[in-house]
Image: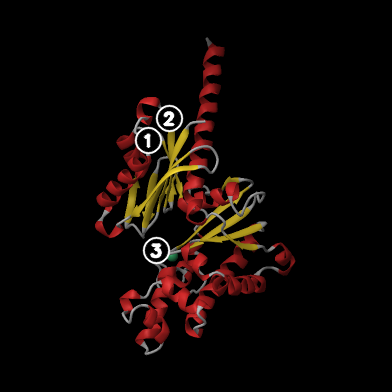
Amino acid sequence: MDYVLALDLGGTKIYSALVGSGDQIIKKDVRPTEAAQGKEKVIANILASLEAVIPSRSRQDGLIAGIGVGAPGPLDSRSGTIFFAPNLEWQNVNLKEILENALGYPVFLENDANLAALGEYLYGAGQGHEDMVFITVSTGVGGGLVLGGEIYSGAFGGAGEIGHLVVAPDGPLCPCGNRGCLEAVASGRALKRKALDLIAAGKGRRILELAGGEPEGVEAPVITRVGHAGDPEARALLAEAGRYLGLAIGNIANLLNPSLFIIGGGVARGAGKLLLGPARAEAELRVFPALRDFLKIVPGALRGRAGVLGAAAFARRKLRFNHREELANGHKAQDQS
Ligand SMILES: [Zn+2]
């Protein structure tokens, strides 16, 4: 089969890849998104990143069949419009059209966490689990649903926004404008904010030390490192985030009864059991007792590659589907003549 391009557009980094069959990444490019510099700069970075993985002779040879793109949503996969991406400060941007016009390949856009879920389902920790939920804990919190072996994106493309499940009704403000969303209490950004609150209150001495004595240096990886070194304050921050994550998992388990929850994302990876332990305990406490035995929570297996591998698989699925449609329409036209 032809190669496909895959793009995972995140709030902090852009990951592009040239993908062969299955999970074979032939070439990749990772660079900063630079979201603070505005939409035009981000689009220029996306194009430069994709160009970096396109083999030089591929344009003449027709080697590349299409591009799968994972972007923060909610978005309309069909038209290719990103409705609202608070971390990029984008509203109603038709990324599909922009990329198709610039590169000349068909583009298939889907929510980034949905594609990471598909990647884990096909090639990672979710293999064999036709009904599974993926949650990514990184700068923000995202979620993706695979139900019956397919991405479930809902009637209007907005399903799976697990980061915006409200778990603390009077909690802190979320970038989406609501209060107490999972993202506002369990993301890397939330951990940073809570650590800075501690420091402002004259506490969190070891977190501040590892941040080089500067509050600006406090980031989620610093907190998880201090936590692994045994600092009780850092551990308490991670445990609190984990409990909120578990609360959300318990609720989702009651709604969907999936056979697996996969927790991915840089912050979850860094924190490991300091986050997943409390999450598991809280989820077991919250899930409907009859469903407790089905609760299975594991870390992601693909690390940063879940998004691009899912994007590549999504593009291939869409290309195959379009090809079948064309064939079917061709037969119909022949039958009528
Ligand atoms: Zn929110």
Tell me the amino acid under the disc marked 1: Pro
Rounded to the nearest angstrom, the CA distance separating label 3 from label 1 is 39 Å
Dot 2 and dot 1 residues touching (CB under 8 Å): yes
Residue at point 38%, 45% (across, down): 81
Q: CB of residue at label 3: within 8 Å of ligand 1?
A: yes
Q: Which residue is mark 2?
A: 63
Describe the element under mark 3 as helix, strand or loop: loop
In terms of sequence position, does the residue under pointer 3 or pointer 1 come before the other?
1
In terms of sequence position, does the residue under pointer 2 or pointer 1 come before the other?
1
Q: CB of residue at label 2: within 8 Å of ligand 1?
A: no
Which quadrant of the frame does ligand 1 lie within?
bottom left
Residue at point 52%, 82% (across, down): 230
Dot 3 and dot 1 residues touching (CB under 8 Å): no
Tell me the amino acid under the disc marked 2: Leu
Q: Which residue is mark 3?
A: 176
Q: Is residue 154 above or below residue 161?
A: above
Disc assigned to residue 65: none
Towards the viewer: 158 or 270 = 270
Towards the viewer: 81 or 63 = 63
Q: Is residue 177 above or below residue 331?
A: below
- Mark 2, other Cα within 10 Å: few <14 / some 14–19 / many ≥20: some
